[in-house]
Image (cartoon, helix red, strand yellow):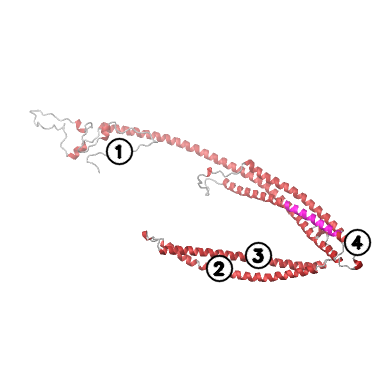
Amino acid sequence: MEFLGTTQTASYCGPKKSCLLPEVAPTSLSHDSYQAYYLPGYRYLNSWRPSLFYKVSAFRPGDEGAGRLSAPLRPPTILPSVRSSLYARYSPHDWYKANAVQIKGSEAYRHWAGRLNADSARLMQDKDQLTRQQQEDSGKNLGQRLADIDFWRSELTYELERLLNDTRALDTAKRRLECAADEAQGPLQVALECLYNREKRMGIDLVHDHVERNLIQEVDLIRACQEKMRKLAERIDQQMNLNRDAQHALERDLGDKSSAHFIDEKCYNLRNTSDSINYYHGIEKIDGTVSVPETWAKFSDDNIRYSQNARANTAILCEEANHTLEITSDDMWKQWTDSNLSFTSRISEIADAKNQLQAQLAKTLQEIFQTENTIMLLERAIMAKECPLKVAQTRLEARTRRPNMELCRDVPQFKLVNEVFTIDDTLQTLKLRLREAQDTLQLLILNKSKLEHDLMVKANSLFIDKEKCMGMRKTFPSTPRLVGYT
């Protein structure tokens, strides 16, 4: 509410002061003339009034119109409301002063704004130049980093190829030793069986002749060669583990460098107009680095040196394996004698084992069939619970849209929640049982494959013992077989 005769230019209606701009002097030098306003019932003793410029004429006897105020010295009679407004007027002096102060303040503001604009333009230019220079330096550093990564990638790739070639050669030597050791088992069994058969001789034929001495010498020689080849194969296997460690280290390092190259190349190709740039506040405060350029290069150099050491040991073992195979092959050829081995008892044992495996396989197949039926029933039971769960959850979702106080945790709400939890628990139980059934099925299938594999092994053993070995009892393995090539 506004009192009659008040002015709208009071001090509390003025603009707020800013802490960034210079303070402007008030628009009037007269505090009374700026804040003077009239309210009915209040008296102002020291306030300026426009009526002070008017003087009341004295009563002059004899003048016509005595007792009246002269026209130019007294304002005409006006209404009380207009009279009250007249007492709140400013003087012309205050008006001119206010305009002068306003113009001066405006000049100060414009001067301040001009300086601020010039400084801002220089600041923006300097910061733009600094930003561009830093971005160019970062791009150059990323390019140098890509060149370093390419160098070490080529070194690692070259070393990895050589290591793989040497590892394949060492694996071939190991397989040759294992094959030679297995191949020597046949002549050993032949020689032992001959000794056992010769014990059945009767009478004068039980004689320690030259053939028996050669058979005993052959058994000792074959066992010594097998032990020597097995020990060498174990050493090769240990070296292959070391080679695989070196290979994994090279591959991991190479893979890391490929990933780092991809990331740095992507960062190198980023521009201010790229679509994939975004704000990541606080990322500059996160330091997840684990190496410096010196340790980074030393890591790859250590991997290469470790691989080179493994390749040197691999070459030594390959030469030793070749020398051992040649020596043992020559020795066994010299000690070979014309003898045979009987496989009657062994063939009978293998046939019995094969029959037992076949019976067990039939039972396993029946159990697999029953387990598959159980899995099918469990899957149907799980599918049957989906619709009740959907109904309960749909009811709960629909009841969440009840208005205001109608959102009551009533008995239907409690029952629906309990129903959802119960169905979920039922589904979890059925799914757990389904997984158990599936795991059991996998175990049965694995057992079935093992039984089939054992049956194949037994059939192969029967074929070897009954057909091959009995047909090869008068022959001896050739040199390529003894050195592990076949």
Disc number lying in front (4 or 3): 4
- 179 w.r.t. 282: above or below: below
- Depth check, front residue: 49 or 458: 458
Q: Magenta region: which residues? A: 217-239
Majority secondary structure of magenta residues:
helix
Label 2 CA crowd tier, 10 Å (few <14, some 14–19, many 20+): some
3D distance between C-alphas at marks 4 and 1: 136 Å
Q: Tell me, for residue 12, which label it has, or none.
A: 1
Disc 4 target residue = 210
* Mark 3 or 1, nearer chain start: 1
**Relative image position of residue 309 (x, y in whole percent):** 73, 46
Disc 2 target residue = 378
* Direction from residue 382 to residue 97 in the image, left or right: left
Is 25 inside the magenta-drawn segment? no
* Mark 2 or 4, nearer chain start: 4
The local secondary structure at tag 1 comes to helix
Label 3 CA crowd tier, 10 Å (few <14, some 14–19, many 20+): few
Q: Tell me, for residue 446, which label it has, or none.
A: 3
**Relative image position of residue 450 (x, y in whole percent):** 68, 65
- Tag 2: amino acid: Leu
Asked if disc 1 and disc 2 are in contact, CB closer than 8 Å, the reply is no
Disc number lying in front (4 or 1): 4
- Tag 3: amino acid: Leu
Q: Is residue 429 visible?
A: yes
Asked if disc 2 and disc 4 are in contact, CB closer than 8 Å, the reply is no
